[in-house]
Image: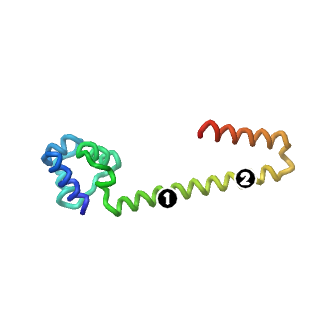
Amino acid sequence: MTFGEKVREARKKAGLSQAALANEIGVTLRTVRGWEVDGRYPFGADTYEKLSRVLDCELDYLMSNDEIRATEAIKSKSHTSEARRAKAVLNEARRLFASDIVTKKEKLSFLQDIQNIFLNLK
């Protein structure tokens, strides 16, 4: 089922005309028709959220399989990027602890700071 078909089905189930739906979410009638007839999609997550609320349906229901896959890919990429950054921090910490330039007291202080960050943000 396409995005437009889902919107049309949910809109009718909610007892709304295209004009009423447009008014409720703050878009033009032409925009709603574009979704339902022309195969267009909303710009931005906020519009999807408004549609979900007004049509009383799950956000995932409105999203096409391609959109869900794209969202998951973005989340996965973001997670991968965060994992890489965490590894880089660990590698820097490893170099720091292996260094003779930094004193044992400074290393302990650094370790305590990391532990405090973890405990405060947990």
**Which residue is rendered at x = 21% and y = 40% of the image?**
24
- Left or right of 103? Residue 55 is left
Disc 1 or 2, which lies upstream in sequence?
Answer: 1
Residue 64 vs residue 27, the one in the foreground: 64
Which amino acid does the dot numbered 1 rest on?
Ser
Residue 76 percent coordinates (x, y): 49, 58
Q: Residue at x 19, y 46 (%)?
A: 28
38 is higher (above) or lower (below) than 28: below
Q: Would residue 22 be found to the left or right of residue 114 on screen?
A: left
Q: Nearer the viewer, mark 1 or mark 2?
A: 1
The quadrant in which residue 80 appears is bottom right
Q: In the rendered view of the protein, which quadrant contains the N terminus?
A: bottom left
Q: Is residue 38 above or below residue 16?
A: below
Residue 46 % position (x, y):
33, 45
Residue at 16% across, 48% down:
29
Location of residue 105 by image quarter: top right
Q: Element at badge 1?
A: helix
Q: Which residue is mark 2?
A: 92
Identify the residue at horizontal 45%, vertical 60% (top origin): 73
Crowding near pointer 2: few (<14 within 10 Å), some, many (20+)?
few
Q: Which residue is mark 1?
A: 76
Residue 18 vs 116, above or below: the answer is: below
Q: Which amino acid does the dot numbered 2 rest on? A: Glu
What is the C-alpha distance between the residues marked 1 and 2? Answer: 24 Å
